[in-house]
Amino acid sequence: MNHVWKIYDLERIIADGMVTAVTYACESEIEDASTRTIGYLSLTTGSTSDSGFIAYEDLTEATVLNWVQANVDQPTVETENSASIAADVVARAAIVKRNGTPW
């Protein structure tokens, strides 16, 4: 099972670039089966004068992923995605009829 965490979007205050929320995803796949969980994380923000503040234009996906992974139960999300894929594989294997024409 391969799990890839991604950042889909950032919400920020235009005036100062303070990021207030993150839309993220965990995309999971094995062979020809896949699923994803998309989440939204509201951030507790401080001030642009705080030590450690990173300007919006200087943010990297790795930095924001660290924020997400510090606040989201990563093993639970990955386990749920794995279970969803397993259920899909079982359901596909149970299909015994198919519609269509041979031409």
Image: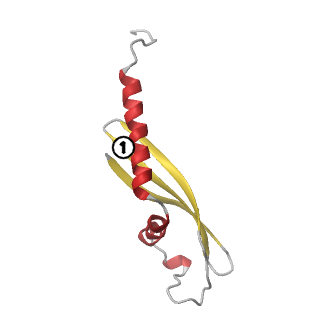
Position of 11 compared to 26: left or right? right
Residue 27, compared with residue 64, is above or below; it is above
Q: Residue at x 65, y 81 (%)?
A: 16
Judging depth in this view, the residue of 77 and 18 nearest the camera is 77
Location of residue 62 by image quarter = bottom left
Judging depth in this view, the residue of 11 and 89 nearest the camera is 89
Quarter holding the N terminus is: top left
The residue that label 1 is drawn on is 29
Image x and y of residue 74, in percent: 42, 58
Q: Residue at x 39, y 9 (%)?
A: 102
Secondary structure of the residue carrying numbered label 1: strand
Image x and y of residue 35, in percent: 44, 42
The way the protein has been coloured in the rendering is secondary structure
Q: Residue at x 67, y 74 (%)?
A: 13
Q: Of the residues shown, which amino acid type is indicated by label 1?
A: Glu
Image x and y of residue 15, in percent: 69, 80
Position of 67 compared to 30: left or right? right
Q: Residue at x 34, y 35 (%)?
A: 32
Judging depth in this view, the residue of 32 and 67 nearest the camera is 67
Residue 101, compared with residue 82, is above or below; it is above
Q: Residues within 10 Å of mark 1 (few under 14, many from 20)?
A: some
Image x and y of residue 59, in percent: 49, 75
